[in-house]
Amino acid sequence: MLTLTRKGLYCQPGDFYIDPSGAVERAVITHAHSDHARRGSQIYYTVNEGVSVLKTRLGKNILVKSFAYGEKFFFNDIQVSFHPAGHILGSSQIRMEYKNKVWVASGDYKRESDPTCKAFEVVPCDVFLTEATFGAPSFAWKKEPDLGLDIIDWWNGNSKQGLNSILFAYSLGKAQRVLGLLHPYATKPIYCHPATSAINDCYRAEGVGLAPTRCLSKLEDDRILRGELLLVPSSFFRSEYAEFAGTHYKTAFASGWMAKNQGGYGRESSYDRGFVMSDHSDWNDLVRTISETQAKRVYVQHRGNGSLVRHLRSLGVEAYPDSALIPQNPDQLVLF
């Protein structure tokens, strides 16, 4: 069904690519993060909820064909459908059926609750191609019951001391998840970087509830904030907007990398606080998900030669790194 080529995952019987690394004729996109959605393809296929974000990232004039979650469509004899991945708005698993065999390419996914996107759907399959960003036993963290409350408490505590709270979060997905979690609590606007504000508009257009925000680009040049929450990308201090934060602030990072069991990374980093908030599944959720798909064969991306492959094999699952999908005779692939 799938082979791994220089341009990414290629379905030869359907003649399409999944998240290609270069320009192709037909690109089936799991989600709009830049390592999955790239410029130059002739036509992009995605789920309805993902169109606005995809166009914001790649350009409003790209050609996009979209479908509802679960809606079936065909590339030659391959029946394809999108299913929620729980990663970010519009994120999808790609289900492919051909000759009574079902393959699922997970894309990035998580199992934790997120008010800003549809929850992950387990899709039974024969073959499962899974991501494994946190595919090691040490990457297992406690799921906090209310991260939004933790963040608002941190902000309020800093504000009482006259300090700004600078929370670093990826501009697509993570920042909106923070805003969704703060939606029940925030009583004043949260200041966002322009890159984040553009994505916020996409989420709100899809009916996602976010805390009130204000774009840093709207502030007067000589403005210095006090006691505010700034939701910004990691490049913030290298941007023209850094001056708004002044010199009195605390910093935090929202990421799965802030898990306290990662060799103390969260405690020893340059951040004052870490919030363990990942848009990827941890070890326990990866293993649980693979089991629930009932897949007899599994290919592992990102950590293909590591713990997850060995663990799955110990459970009797036929598991391989995704490099096993590289064709032995690539010359047979017309579009390789």
Image: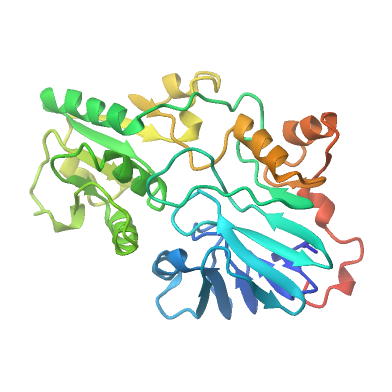
Q: Is residue 233 above or below residue 60?
A: above
Query: Which image quarter holds the N terminus?
Result: bottom right
Position of residue 202 measured from the top left corner of the image (x, y, whole percent) = 34, 63
335 horizontally vs 231: left or right: right
Rendered residue at 64%/60% (across/down): 94
Q: Is residue 49 above or below residue 322?
A: below
Q: Quadrant of residue 181?
A: top left
Q: Nearer the viewer, residue 244 or 167?
A: 167
Residue at image point 30% right, 61% down: 198
For residue 173, side relative to residue 165 (left or right): right
Q: Is residue 19 visible?
A: no
Expressed as whole percent of the image width and height from the top left, the position of residue 53 reads 41, 64
Give the x, y percent position of residue 227. 13, 33
Q: How is the image coloured?
A: rainbow
Image quadrant assignment for residue 269 = top left
Work out whether residue 192 or residue 249 is closer to the camera in this orientation and state it.
192
The answer to whether residue 182 is left or right of residue 322 is left
The structure residue drawn at horizontal position 74% and vertical position 52%, both measured from the top left corner, is 125
